[in-house]
Amino acid sequence: MKTLYIDCSMGAAGDMLTAALLELIPDREKILAKLNSRGIPGVVFQAEESVKCGITGTHMSVKVDGVEEDEHLHDHCHGHGHDHEHHHDHPHGGDEHEHEHEHEHGHSHHHSGLHDIEHIVYDHLKLPTEVALNVMAVYHEIAEAESHVHGVPVDQIHFHEVGMMDAIADITAVCLLMYTLKPDEVVVSPIHVGSGQVKCAHGVLPVPAPATAYILRDIPTYGGNIQGELCTPTGAALLKHFATRFGSQPLMKTSAIGYGMGKKDFPQANCVRAMLGETEDANKKTDVAQPSERTASAPEQASFAEACGADKTVVELSCNVDDMTGEAVGFAMERLFEAGANEVYTVPCGMKKSRPGILLTVLCKPEDKEKMVKLLFAHTTTIGVRETLFNRYVLDRRIETIDTSMGPVRKKISSGYDVTRMKYEHEDLSRIAKEQGISLSEALLRVHMEDQ
């Protein structure tokens, strides 16, 4: 099993996690180019070599409109309501370090809510759907914590524009790197949160900061002797979102090690260490509460496998027609599917005398071949059917049904050949969107968040 172990003995922040994961990828320049081409407004990523306590690693420099994140006061996803108090943070040496500052009424700063962030992530960033969903799930985790701490509804949590771009950059980078690495399991060590206190506009607050502490509830943490805030809200939310479980390093054969460095110097190396390798046994996520799940029943599993065609050999039957209406072709396809075809599809093609035609193709089990041939002759105008026998490679497939606050949702999971894919049943998402009066993408996001 492909396992990622993240050592948080010096806490975690978004930029440090980005740098550590980047070091696990052989073609780092290609990944950096991808990050810089995502279209995050004004943001540029740059990987820099850094040495801490004799260990060489990577520091991830993130610039917003040409200014590196530690050169200005920026809000690291620390929200507020409709007053004039703005919550900013300074980097924990490349890690983010929370502070709050009060501004005079004459100051004008642009702030954005979750809907503005969703607009940026879904409509402007060129991200795979899975990555975009993970980005918003992490952001919602942080917004929920801020809502709890400040006593403000989630939809009234606002984010300072400059710090918002920093946070989007960090979260997007980690989500894209996790999508690239595709680990089967993510094990996270107990998290060192630091110790002491932080001076803020409202007084002195304990470490970890209230939002961080809220996010890390039910997760193993410890304080230690390091004075300062080692784990930021963004680092905490990313770890909570991606962790399969929390604990010590499992028995594993390590193939790559990455060090993501902060800027501050401490008696011990200020870094996040990520280790990628292989383990033998899968471990269930038990440290963080999950929505209740049930595995599909045997008939459901068999039905799904049969519909997808779990056989290793498949027969392809095809014919060309140029004298059928679209309705007639559709009727023939329905009959073939009803008879148990694995797949039926059409491709436009040119035929004799320059007539436009249709290539009709059927994929079926070898034992169903004769039945499909009879149906092709019965429901199409063809006078000949071609046959080809293929060997094919398929992923193992199963269905799980998860219980959500909006009703049960089926989840199709395919795995094998070192990959795992997941997709929610469209009909279930469509039902939720109609019942809740929301878009299909919003329904997908809500289901995805409850499934974490």
Image (cartoon, rainbow, N blue to C red):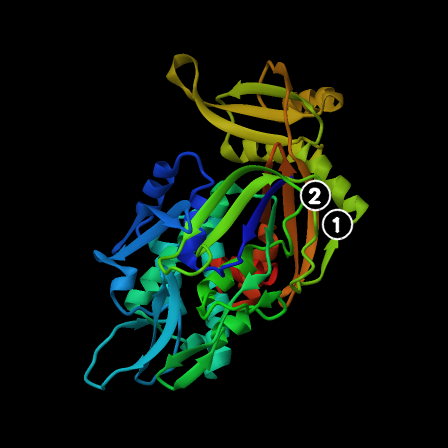
Q: Nearer the viewer, residue 93 or 210?
A: 93
Mark 1 lies on residue? 296
Are the two marked residues, 1 and 2, in contact with CB atoms closer than 8 angstroms?
A: yes
Residue placed at 33% from the left, 85% from the top?
A: 83
The correct choice, above or below, for 303 with respect to 159 in the image is above
Mark 2 lies on residue? 398
Residue 204 sits in which quadrant?
bottom left
Label 1 and label 2: CA atoms lie apart by 8 Å
| SS label for mark 1 | loop
User: In the rendered view of the protein, which quadrant contains the C terminus?
Assistant: bottom right
Where residue 259 appears, x then y in whole percent? 45, 47
Q: Nearer the viewer, residue 330 or 211?
A: 211
Residue placed at 64% from the left, 46% from the top?
A: 412
Q: Is residue 393 left or right of residue 306?
A: left
Where residue 421 appears, x then y in whole percent? 58, 42
Mark 1 vs mark 2: which is more N-terminal? 1
Q: Kindly identify the amino acid type of the residue bearing the numbered disc 1.
A: Ala
Where residue 246 appears, x then y in whole percent? 63, 57
Q: Is residue 438 left or right of residue 121?
A: right
